[in-house]
């Protein structure tokens, strides 16, 4: 009986040692390295790391090496593929990125404007959101949908327009179809007020604009006809179904 018991114990020990010997050992360093690599890919980049990445991998900056990044902030535009960042360069170009780890996934760009060229009165003073340096642009969640948009006073030659842009996930587009494009004018470039005011009007949140659309001269025989809407304040609010700002009507003070 004792012999059988000892034989059984020896058999179990032999089988155990045999299995242990056939197991392929994984070096500790290799296992730790894999874990570090996996966790590092999920660590968000710092502002300095993002800046270095853009300098190294954005073709526009590599081709124009004299340019400098003068503004850099993290944002939430809803652009898929990586963290969203917004940049302003020393040539006034604004770049919007989706960055994943060490890769630029998407990029959009547009030109910003310096409002002091057009008005000594600070027309950006009461515009909500994060002001993009000293430009006429700001970004933030203006329509309350949880995603950031970009507000711009656009000084396009003789055409001054308010534009608000947001990312269109369905069409993978950012700048082709602004949420609004409204002509405006500076009432008094020295004393104000600003041509846009965000406010609540008749229970709706939005903004009013000092509407002014310049007339474009026609051919021979052209007769100027003033726009009856010019010089009046009109209120606009967000329409979630149309995904654009719609005009409510003239603001009666």
Image (cartoon, rainbow, N blue to C red):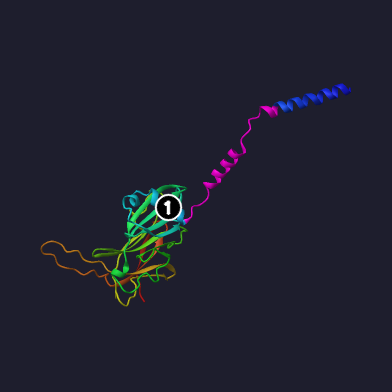
Along the viewing direction, whichever of 133 and 244 lies nearer the viewer: 133
Range of residues picked out in magenta: 19-46
| Percent position of residue 176, x then y | 33, 53
Residue 35 colored in magenta in the image:
yes
Residue 73 colored in magenta in the image:
no
Along the viewing direction, whichever of 33 and 123 lies nearer the viewer: 33
Q: Residues within 10 Å of mark 1 (few under 14, many from 20)?
A: few
**Residue displayed at 39% across by 54% down:** 96
**Residue displayed at 44% across by 50% down:** 99
Tell me where residue 209 sits by quadrant. Answer: bottom left
| Percent position of residue 128, x then y | 42, 67
Along the viewing direction, whichever of 164 and 219 lies nearer the viewer: 164
Q: Is residue 27 depicted above or below 45 in this figure?
A: above
Q: Magenta stretch: dominant SS? A: helix
Q: Is residue 17 depicted above or below 153 in this figure?
A: above
| Percent position of residue 60, x then y | 33, 51
Q: Which residue is mark 1?
A: 52
Tell me where residue 67 sits by quadrant. Answer: bottom left
């Amino acid at each position: 009986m004792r012999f059988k018991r000892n034989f059984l114990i020896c058999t179990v020990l032999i089988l155990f040692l045999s299995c242990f010997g056939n197991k392929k050992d994984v070096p500790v360093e290799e296992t730790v390295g894999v874990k570090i690599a996996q966790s590092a890919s999920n660590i968000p980049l710092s502002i300095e790391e993002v800046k270095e990445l853009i300098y190294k991998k954005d073709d526009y900056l590599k081709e124009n090496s004299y340019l400098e990044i003068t503004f850099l902030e993290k944002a939430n535009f809803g652009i898929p593929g990586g963290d969203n960042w917004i940049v302003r360069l020393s040539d006034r170009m604004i770049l919007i990125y989706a960055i994943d780890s060490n890769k630029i996934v998407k990029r959009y760009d547009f030109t910003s404007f310096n409002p002091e060229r057009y008005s000594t009165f600070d027309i950006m003073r009461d515009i909500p959101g994060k002001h993009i340096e000293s430009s006429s642009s700001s970004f933030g969640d203006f329509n309350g949908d949880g995603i950031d948009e970009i507000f711009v006073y656009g000084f396009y030659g003789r055409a001054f327009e308010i534009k608000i842009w947001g990312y269109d996930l369905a069409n993978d587009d950012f700048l082709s179809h602004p949420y609004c494009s409204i002509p405006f004018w500076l009432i008094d470039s020295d004393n104000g007020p600003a041509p846009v005011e965000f406010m609540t009007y008749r229970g709706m949140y939005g903004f009013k604009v000092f509407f002014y659309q310049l007339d474009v001269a026609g051919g021979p025989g052209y007769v100027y006809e003033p726009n009856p809407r010019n010089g009046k304040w009109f209120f606009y609010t967000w329409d979630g179904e149309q995904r654009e700002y719609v005009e409510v009507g003239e603001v009666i003070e």
